[in-house]
């Protein structure tokens, strides 16, 4: 993964993910007209929800500026992507094991 700057945007290799343009193109193909800036806004909205939920569960009170800073952090986004991959792998394992019971 590369970073534009210390707190800049994250870019990932093709093996690790897709960029906002690719997300927008896929969503448009699925019938949800979207451009890359809309894709970015949707991703950041979800990242903010993750931050707010995590900090609330930990009993931490954070203002919107701090939540936004964390949500935009490439490190946080990579960590969330990693967690989602683990959840998806577990879901697949659970789904395939149900077929053999």
Image (tube, rainbow, N blue to C red):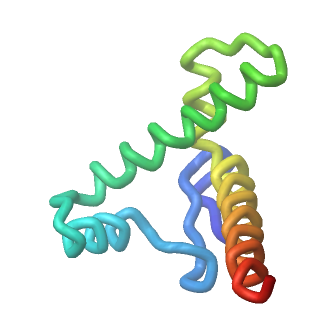
Image quadrant in which you'd find residue 84: bottom right
Asked if 71 appears above or below 17 in the picture, the reply is above
Asked if 45 appears above or below 17 in the picture, the reply is above
Residue reaching furthest to the right: 58
Q: Position of residue 51 (x, y in %)?
A: 65, 32
Residue reaching furthest to the bottom: 100
Q: Is residue 12 left or right of residue 89?
A: left
Q: Which residue is drawn at 29% across and 59% down?
A: 36
Image quadrant in which you'd find residue 94: bottom right
**Foreground of the two, 87 or 61:** 87
**Foreground of the two, 56 or 91:** 91
Asked if 76 appears above or below 53 in the picture, the reply is below
Image quadrant in which you'd find residue 49: top right
Q: Which residue is drawn at 21% across and 58% down?
A: 34
Q: Position of residue 56 (x, y in %)?
A: 73, 20
**Foreground of the two, 101 or 67:** 101
Q: Which residue is drawn at 32% across and 68% down?
A: 21
Asked if 69 appears above or below 76 in the picture, the reply is above
């Amino acid at each position: 993964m590369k970073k534009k700057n210390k707190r800049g945007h994250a870019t990932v290799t093709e093996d690790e993910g897709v960029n906002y343009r690719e997300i927008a193109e896929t969503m448009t193909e699925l019938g949800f007209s979207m451009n890359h800036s809309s894709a970015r806004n949707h991703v950041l909205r979800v990242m903010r929800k993750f931050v707010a939920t995590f900090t609330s569960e930990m009993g931490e009170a954070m203002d919107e500026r701090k939540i936004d800073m964390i949500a935009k952090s490439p490190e946080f986004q990579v960590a969330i992507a990693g967690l989602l991959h683990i959840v998806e792998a577990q879901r697949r394992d659970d789904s395939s094991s149900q077929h053999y019971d």
